[in-house]
Amino acid sequence: MNDKNPIPTDEELTAYIDGELSEIEASRIEALLGSNERVAARLEFLSQSSLAFKQAFESLLAAAPKAELDAMLGIVPVAAKPARSSRRGFLGALAACLVAGVVADRAFIGIRNRVHAPDESSEWRAVVAEYIALYTADTLAGPSPSDDAQAEQLARFDDKLGLSLSPEAVSLPGIEFKRAQLLQYDDKPLAQIAYLDPETGPLALCIVRSDVGMKEPDVEGRHGMNVVYWSNATHAFMLIGRIPIDLMQELAEDVRKNTSA
């Protein structure tokens, strides 16, 4: 890449997502998206941020002493500014509140704890998705293990995760069970069961310990794959693959029923 068209920073990509770049800068990034896979992948990752910052901190901003902050920071009144709603603009307002110390209280601590939940729910799914995105059908080539071998592999989860699973509980109709293995995320065990769908390729069910509590299934997209995620009283689950989302939800619901605690 020559210096005339350098790799954009995350801040520039975020500004592009929010429509805050000039036409020239936006065109430069669009040209890179078609020729640089790393830039395209990073843009996709930043586009999929699912934290509801605005909703989480809205009430705190409303309670802030706006007039005093405006005077202290020299802020132009909102009426004199162009109307715009973006993550960068919102986070800028939040930063002003932090400078004034108006959110350093129990309300902020409570919201921070909800955003950074103990199971790091969004973050661990992002890490898993990046890993699974590297899988191809060749990654999982070879014969599928027997029922006895599957049971033996799954038994390892009981020791490390306190999770007892049978091959029947995690079977997916029409999709081959290929292997069950223990990985590690944030110094904690992460269970992965890999499958191979004959039409769409690799699929994975991943599980970590969680004390967040019961959460109904939800969906999201990561790295061109569909994700269905949920949690029970003791563990968080995610099913990820390129199968259409309606079928993914059906498969996830079967697993959820079979693994309920």
Image (cartoon, helix red, strand yellow):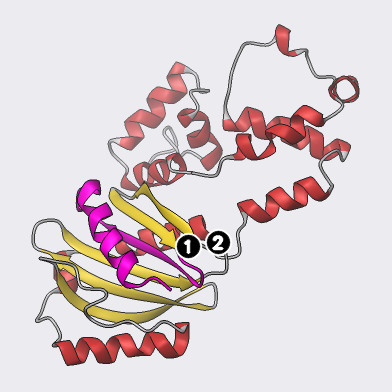
Quadrant position of residue 143:
bottom left
Q: Where is residue 147 shown, x and y percent of the image?
A: 16, 87
Q: Amino acid at mark 2?
A: Glu
Q: Which residue is mark 2?
A: 120
Q: Secondary structure beneath disc 1?
A: helix
Region rendered in magenta: 232-261
Q: Where is residue 106 shown, x and y percent of the image?
A: 82, 50
Q: Amino acid at mark 1?
A: Trp
Q: Are marks 2 and 1 in contact (CB under 8 Å)?
A: yes
Q: Secondary structure beneath disc 2?
A: loop
Residue under the image location 47 percent in, 29 percent down = 16
Q: Where is residue 63 shown, x and y percent of the image?
A: 81, 30
Q: How many marks?
A: 2
Q: Is residue 9 left or right of residue 183?
A: right
Q: Which residue is mark 1?
A: 124
Q: Is residue 154 left or right of residue 5?
A: left
Judge whether 68 appears above or below 191 on screen.
above
Q: Using the numbered discs, state the Cα–Cα distance from disc 2 to disc 1 in whole angstroms.
A: 6 Å
Quadrant position of residue 59:
top right
